[in-house]
Image (spheres, grey):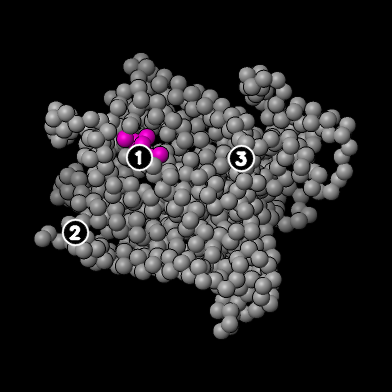
């Protein structure tokens, strides 16, 4: 509880936490949605916002409010799959490289360096093109996960490197605990905060990536996500025709989501850094 | 000689290895994917409504196999790819047959490089100078205000930011043209009217890139400068009565600039692939637009050509920066 109270002293944490709660609530609302998000022509087209349709309707005959709710839900699903799976890869690679050292370390770090240098975006585009027919929320999440771990594996490795030199490692090894047990029991607690803050950054990378792939038409265009929703609005010339509610809904939702995720991660990592935490919380 | 052996040679070996693995990845990835590019190309042509009789299809499959470099065993294909690369032959574009990919890229390259080189360097300069000053005077009000602005702009994906800018300055107040690299019907020449036209068209994309890029540099620079500022030698210079301007530019910013130079190298390398969304949003006729059309039409050779070019460009940019590094940092030079 004390941790939460300290965190809430930062206005950025308070704001972003509330915004994210609202967005998650919106995503949860889709359970009671009156419309099927993939069907066209369920409501009259191009209506302005009214009591019946709080954010109006679009040229495909869909309710913009519910489209937005589904878009947030699906974008979050993609980003959580991508974030969690790539975290698992990053933790495994980082820990093995950091703990085993020597040749294993060299090989693993060379792979992750290559991932950082190669224009991943183009390779993702190439792959997405090839598996276009199989594209859904899960495969897209997995595709992004495969490419999103390199930098974070490096961060985790450097932390493990420093942990390995500390005395408690010697104590644990001398008292006969195995490698796996040592890593799980002693190192994971140290690495958890780092994993969590990289998770948030990785999630917003995945959401942005999804939007980019949607511009290229490489995702399943019938599933509403922030990217596809915006792409439909643009391809129907909603800007020129003045259907501002259709364009602005995904844009505003995206801005809220990105700023909230970023502020949350900055605030948490500042809190985790003992130097900045003292400034904020004050010596107690 | 010690410098050569300990710094230069390992660096060059790494450079060659990364390019080697990058090209291998570009070669393997599509071949490991569960779909067949030839089948999907034929399916695409069929779905566009044209009828193909079996004999034509057979001929077609053979041509495509040749065109995509899929002839022979995996090993033979791989060797053939390298052989073509050394000749500078990236194959023929499929949907603008028979223009070679290299010609298409050459046509689009000046637009992209012109726009991105300028904006990357400009954003870097502005971001670093403002960030350096804001870091040095971090207790001032304007510095904190800039911080909040950066906190809002920074996380926005480029796409959203560019759209907002386009809506505001292109549609709403109509100050700038909303699409294209130059007015339709203008012929490229070195006259003032043409140059002015190009500049006017590239203003919005440039503005969006400079602001977003600059914000990134601003934030890191500010952080680094704040750290350098806390070091002893700065305190000493202050106590010794060295002029403030001299401390900021000669001592603090110069020290903080080193990691930023590495960053600039990476950013310059990204030019070849980073412009995709810019060019789509502003309909700018560069490499990004070329890639976009290649993806839409499934022009596989063209995509592969652009990817290969980017790999070489990025690794080369990083290599050059690494080799220039000793010029900026005496500590690396003397090690």
**Main secondary structure type of the part rendered in magenta:** helix
Tell me which segment is drawn in magenta.
Answer: A89-95
Residue visible at 39% across and 53% down in the picture: A200
Q: Which mark is residue B23?
A: none
Residue extending furthest toward the bottom = A51
Decide whether residue B22 is among the magenta residues. no
**Residue B159 falls in image quadrant:** bottom right
For the residues tagged 3 and 2, is the chain the same? yes
Mark 3, Cα crowd under 10 Å, few <14 / some 14-19 / many 20+, is many
**Which residue position holds label 2?**
A279
Per the model, the C-alpha gap separating discs 1 and 3 is: 27 Å
**Residue B138 falls in image quadrant:** bottom left
Q: Earlier in the sequence, mark 3 or mark 2?
A: 3
Residue visible at 19% across and 31% down in the picture: A177
Between tags 3 and 2, which lies in front?
A: 3
**Which residue position holds label 1?**
A91
Out of B152 and A179, give the one closest to the viewer.
A179
Between tags 1 and 2, which lies in front?
A: 1
Q: For this view, does A240 lie left or right of residue A12?
A: right
């Amino acid at each position: 509880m004390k941790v939460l109270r300290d965190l809430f002293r930062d206005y950025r944490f308070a704001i972003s936490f509330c915004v994210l709660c609202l967005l998650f609530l919106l995503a949860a609302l889709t359970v009671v949605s009156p419309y099927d998000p993939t069907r066209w022509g369920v409501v009259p087209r191009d209506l302005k916002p009214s009591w019946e349709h709080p954010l109006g309707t679009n040229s495909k005959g869909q309710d913009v409010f519910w489209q937005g709710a589904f878009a947030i839900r699906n974008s979050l699903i993609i980003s959580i799959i991508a974030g969690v799976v790539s975290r698992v890869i990053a933790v495994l690679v980082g820990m093995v490289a950091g703990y085993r050292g020597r040749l294993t370390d060299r090989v693993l770090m060379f792979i992750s360096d290559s991932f950082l240098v190669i224009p991943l975006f183009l390779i993702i585009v190439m792959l997405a093109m090839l598996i276009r027919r199989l594209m859904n929320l899960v495969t897209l999440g997995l595709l992004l996960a495969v490419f999103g771990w390199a930098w974070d594996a490096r961060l985790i490795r450097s932390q493990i490197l420093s942990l390995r030199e500390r005395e408690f490692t010697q104590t644990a090894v001398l008292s006969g605990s195995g490698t796996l047990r040592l890593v799980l029991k002693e190192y994971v607690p140290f690495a958890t905060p780092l994993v969590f803050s990289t998770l948030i950054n990785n999630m917003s990378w995945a959401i942005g990536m999804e939007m980019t792939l949607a511009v290229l038409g490489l995702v399943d265009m019938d599933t509403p996500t922030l990217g596809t929703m915006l792409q439909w609005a643009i391809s129907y010339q909603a800007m020129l025709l003045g259907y501002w509610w259709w364009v602005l809904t995904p844009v505003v939702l995206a801005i809220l989501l990105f700023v909230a995720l970023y502020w949350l991660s900055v605030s948490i990592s500042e809190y985790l850094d003992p130097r900045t935490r003292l400034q904020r919380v004050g010596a107690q | 000689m010690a410098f050569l052996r300990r710094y230069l040679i390992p660096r060059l070996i790494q450079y060659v290895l990364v390019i080697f693995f990058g090209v291998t990845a570009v070669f393997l990835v599509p071949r490991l994917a569960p779909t067949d590019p030839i089948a999907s190309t034929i399916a695409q042509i069929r779905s566009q409504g044209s009828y193909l009789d079996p004999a034509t299809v057979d001929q077609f499959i053979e041509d495509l196999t040749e065109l995509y470099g899929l002839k022979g065993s995996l090993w033979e294909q791989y060797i053939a790819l390298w052989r073509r690369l050394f000749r500078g032959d990236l194959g023929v574009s499929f949907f603008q047959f028979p223009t070679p990919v290299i010609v298409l890229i050459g046509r689009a390259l000046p637009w992209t490089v012109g726009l991105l080189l300028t904006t990357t360097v400009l954003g870097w300069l502005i971001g670093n100078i403002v960030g350096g000053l804001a870091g040095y005077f971090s207790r001032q009000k304007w510095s904190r205000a800039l911080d909040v602005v950066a906190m809002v702009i920074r996380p926005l994906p480029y796409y959203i930011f560019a759209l907002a800018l386009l809506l505001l300055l292109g549609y709403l107040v109509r100050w700038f043209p909303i699409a294209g690299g130059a007015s339709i019907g203008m012929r490229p020449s070195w006259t003032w009217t043409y140059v002015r036209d190009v500049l006017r068209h590239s203003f919005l994309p440039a503005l969006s890139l400079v602001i977003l890029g600059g914000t990134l540099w601003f934030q890191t620079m500010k952080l680094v400068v704040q750290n350098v500022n806390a070091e002893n030698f700065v305190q000493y210079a202050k106590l010794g009565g060295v002029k403030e301007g001299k401390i900021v530019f000669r001592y603090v910013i110069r020290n903080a600039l080193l990691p930023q130079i590495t960053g600039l190298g990476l950013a310059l390398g990204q030019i070849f692939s980073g412009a995709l969304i810019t060019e789509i949003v502003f309909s700018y006729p560069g490499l990004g637009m070329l890639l976009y059309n290649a993806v839409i039409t499934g022009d596989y050779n063209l995509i592969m050509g652009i990817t290969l070019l980017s790999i070489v460009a990025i690794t080369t940019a990083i290599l050059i920066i690494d080799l220039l590094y000793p010029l900026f940092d005496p500590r690396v030079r003397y090690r």
